[in-house]
Amino acid sequence: MSTSIDTIIPSGEPWMGVVRTGQQFTIVDLEGNQAVDTLFYNASDGAEHYSATHTIRAQRNIYLTTGSMLMSNRDRPLLRIIEDTCGRHDTLGGACSAESNTVRYALDKRHMHSCRDSFLLALARDDSGLGKRDLPSNINFFMNVPVTPEGGLTFADGVSAAGRHVSMLALLDVRVLISNCPQLNNPCNAYNPTPVRVIVRDVA
Ligand SMILES: [Zn+2]
């Protein structure tokens, strides 16, 4: 296997890259319990993107793990999770934002870094043509958002640990947009955001 991308995303930083059909895309939770807010787009048509609704409906389960097919808003598979040493990834929690920081935590958290701001920063830096309207609900890799039997949504202590990883096979050329979550107010990352590693490999 030859490696075409191998990089570290510091906590609180965005990252954007393209994974070609047949390539393997891996995210490593280097220090454990990090939340990696991630979106996927058809690399040649940004109007087609990851859809939580289509993905949940296709697999009849709200959590992502090995075997999960990440579906687009046109009901086409974008990537398949082929390896997962964490075991559970969130589809429902969405991205933190200035607004959610004030509602969930306190008014004075408004100016803290947020994933939505990181997404917008990455889109502004890149010539992808994507903008504010192209931010659907994202995946939170390594984040634990258990749903109660009554359907309640809770943010819980993380289930990941240092060195755990998730690998996907691209079934289409996809643009990846990541915000390595800067959140300092949430137990899912033990109030301590940490770096992750992303690797793109050609599968021989
Ligand atoms: Zn976040």
Image (cartoon, rainbow, N blue to C red):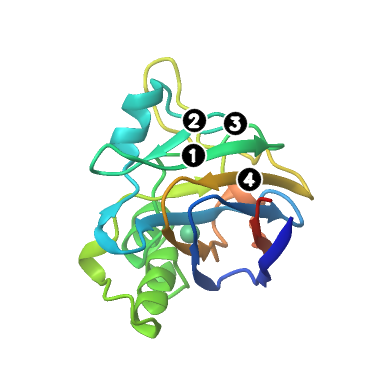
At horizontal 54% and vertical 50% (from top left) the residue drawn is 22
Task: Label 3, secondary structure: give it.
Answer: loop
Task: Label 2, secondary structure: give it.
Answer: loop
Q: CA distance from mark 2 to mark 1?
A: 6 Å
Lower position in the chain sequence, tag 2 or tag 1? 2
Would you call the spot at circle 4 few (<14 residues within 10 Å), some (14-19), or many (20 or more)? Answer: many
The answer to whether the residue bearing label 3 lies less than 8 angstroms from the nearest atom of ligand 1 is no
At horizontal 66% and vertical 37% (from top left) the residue drawn is 83
Query: Which amino acid, by three-letter code, is at mark 1?
Result: Asp
Task: Label 1, secondary structure: give it.
Answer: loop
Q: Which residue is mark 4?
A: 167
Q: CA distance from mark 4 to mark 3?
A: 9 Å
Q: Which residue is more in the foreground, 65 or 109?
A: 65
Lower position in the chain sequence, tag 4 or tag 2? 2
Lower position in the chain sequence, tag 3 or tag 1? 3
Query: Which amino acid, by three-letter code, is at mark 2?
Result: Tyr
Q: CA distance from mark 3 to mark 2?
A: 10 Å
Q: Which residue is mark 3?
A: 66
Query: Which amino acid, by three-letter code, is at mark 3?
Result: Thr
Q: Which residue is mark 2?
A: 63
Location of residue 28 in the rendering, given as x and y in whole percent from the top left corner: 70, 54
Lower position in the chain sequence, tag 1 or tag 4? 1
Would you call the spot at circle 3 few (<14 residues within 10 Å), some (14-19), or many (20 or more)? Answer: some
Q: Which residue is mark 1?
A: 90
Q: CA distance from mark 3 to mark 1?
A: 13 Å
Given contact means CB atoms under 8 Å apart, are the residues at marks 2 and 1 in contact? yes
Q: State whether residue 59 appears in this view.
A: yes
Answer left or right for 67 relative to 116.
Answer: right
Lower position in the chain sequence, tag 4 or tag 3? 3
Task: Label 4, secondary structure: give it.
Answer: strand
